[in-house]
Image (tube, helix red, strand yellow):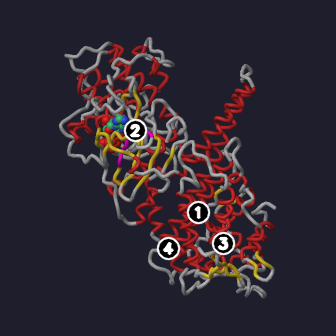
Amino acid sequence: TPGPGNAQKPLYLCSPFADAALVVGNFKTIVMQPKHVDVLEWVAVNIFDFYQNLNLFYGVLAECCTQQSCPTMSAGPQLNYTWINQDRKSVQLPAPTYIDYVMTWVQNLLDDENVFPTRSGREFPPNFPSTVKHVYRQLLRVFAHLYHAHYPQILHLRSEPHFNSLFAHFLAFGKEYQLLDMKDVQGQPGSPVGIGALYDKWKDKGILSA
Amino acid sequence: SSSKEKPADYVYFERTTAGFSDDAVPRAKAAQLKLEHFYKVAVDAAIERNTRRVELERKLAADTTMSDERKQRHLIQLGKRESAFLRLRRTKLGLDDFRTVKVIGKGAFGEVRVVQKSDTGKIYAMKTLRKEEMLKKDQLAHVRAERDVLAESNSPWVVQLYYSFQDPTYLYLIMEFLPGGDLMTMLIKYDTFSEDVTRFYIAECVLAIEAVHKLGFIHRDIKPDNILIDKDGHIKLSDFGLSTGFHKQHDSSYYQRLLESANGATSPTSAARNSVMVNAIHLTMSNKDQIATWKANRRKLAYSTVGTPDYIAPEIFLQKGYGNECDWWSLGAIMFECLVGYPPFCSESTHDTYQKIIHWQTYLIFPDDVHLSREAEDIIRRLITSPERRLNVDQIKHHPFFYGVNWGSIRTIEAPFVPRLRSITDTSYFPTDELEQVPEEPTGGDASAANKDLAFLGYTFKRFTISSHAF
Ligand SMILES: Nc1ncnc2c1ncn2[C@@H]1O[C@H](COP(=O)(O)OP(=O)(O)OP(=O)(O)O)[C@@H](O)[C@H]1O
């Protein structure tokens, strides 16, 4: 039985789930830029992999993330992300719609030879760093929603060691390449992001280096 | 009890899959396996990348004659290759990127075609393997072995694998195209070889088999059809369909477990646990663990009976386990065929061949009407013999039959038959007219049960040395 004070605490912050991990040790091994290797190439392939892996898990959880269960793109008790539509208006979307927009948008960028070049000799565009920052921010929101709204389902499917490690790797990578904005992790004073507390917890435990 | 050690925020969570659709559990399992595979590969890649760099840096540091500027250029080149490799990982290749030039061969699970990569115009050999057939015949582990041997080697004696991909129906291997055909086709054409010609091919085979053994593999299926001829007339080994490595993933039972666990067969004890047990992947640069597991498994002997029997050593049939000596028996049988014109135990039926091989003492007969030198007959008799008495690689190299062979430079001398090729896609050394019923283009595939794909996990492969091959 949960002890006193745990009633409100989200499961992803509780033992043993917060510590469950597929990957143990220092993420530096797989995060740090390999010597002599082009940093843009390194960031590009990692973003590519994060997208694929996140998509893999979202594909499993999608059946639980519906218009009914998630009428908004929530990421904390007081936090709903809004989508900026074509008219530059920010609109509330159901989470599955929001995530579908994000994933489609990222997939299109990854497939766009002008943004993520794959042919040999082709350069990355000058605005590549800012594009990647955008992508990172939106993927972070998808993680944030899955932690906030679907963690029990992740537990039912026994995927928490995997999902935690993927997210910890994502955070470690974002930190190393300045893609991670602490505002996006912590949220606003009145509307914190759920995963902000997880970030702090992992930092305290040394899962993420300070 | 142990609850004392539990932290204050310890929570028991009742896990159930009641609210999920039927395929949620297998899909979740598949996602987990894929992620495990992803991190294993990521760690291995980091180690290998690091090794390549350290090796180059060490080599450059030891070179006292090279200027610093040139050394720097070498490092930049390495960085470019590594970057190109990372880029390749984002590049999706599929059937559409290749155009068939000609069907050149047929195997148990599919065909071999000469193909041209549309954008670069480069020529490759593409082998297709039907997943369904392989699942039926329990050949998965073997295919994985084939991929690994080809992929791990940079050896000039092994056909290079550049790329592999899959669709729901087929696996595709994109390999270097060897335009000279194979030794079987050559033996059909010439019937027998002189001892000098035989010495050349067998000596090259000795080095090729040695190279495979050094990679930690036993080929187990060396036969003339797997000895391919390159554009200069030198040989390379192909078809590791039956070779067995010592990696965990080459074990058929490993795949069986994989498929079972994906089907949701979790044991009751694990279902009752509050925390999920995983084999954690350690982010460590040391490959000591890898070497240790490899060494531990190395002693493990392989058991299995598969393939065309003519060249297979008796100990393989006898199921008592065997080591890489079995490949030297095969070489003895091939050498016999080169000089005599047929393999030593060939019979009307495979059953008879098995019998003759097991009773080789009775059935190894050198015909009166073919003259063999004393040395040639002697080495054959020392290869086609019991595993304890069979020559090892050093004894083979020092046998009088190979007197005068320069083992260090044989690949650079002129071969006895150099293919005469009119173009890079010349297929005149292949029996293409016998393959007319095979469709020109592979049909690609659709729809097969999702979990079948699992066993082919990790199959998609991209070679490191891309820069020179311009993928
Ligand atoms: N890389 C290559 N370059 C040129 N020809 C090749 C290449 N790979 C295979 N072939 C040709 O295709 C034939 C069949 O290939 P292979 O032996 O690999 O098929 P297989 O499916 O393993 O057949 P089996 O299992 O019956 O030996 C070979 O004998 C050879 O003639």
Report, in whole angstroms, how far the alpha carbon at label 4 lies from the one at label 3: 25 Å
Callout 1 secondary element: helix
Q: Which residue is mark 3?
A: A141
Ligand 1 lies in quarter: top left
Cα distance, mark 3 to mark 2?
A: 44 Å
- Image quadrant of residue A101? bottom right
What are the residue bounds of the magenta stretch? B120-128
Whether residue B86 is visible = yes
| Ligand 1 within 8 angstroms of badge 1 C-beta | no
Q: Which percent across, then down, holds residue B219?
A: 42, 38
Q: Nearer the viewer, residue B162 or A43?
A: A43
Badge 4 is on which residue? B25
Q: Is residue B78 magenta?
A: no
- As helix, strand or loop, the secondary structure at mark 3 comes to helix
Q: Quadrant of residue B287?
A: top right
Question: Mark 1 highlights which residue?
Answer: A51
- Amino acid of disc 4: Val
Q: Nearer the viewer, residue A151 or A86?
A: A86
Q: Residue at x 45, y 38 (%)?
A: B218
Residue name at image x 56 percent, y 53 percent:
A114
Q: Secondary structure at mark 4?
A: helix
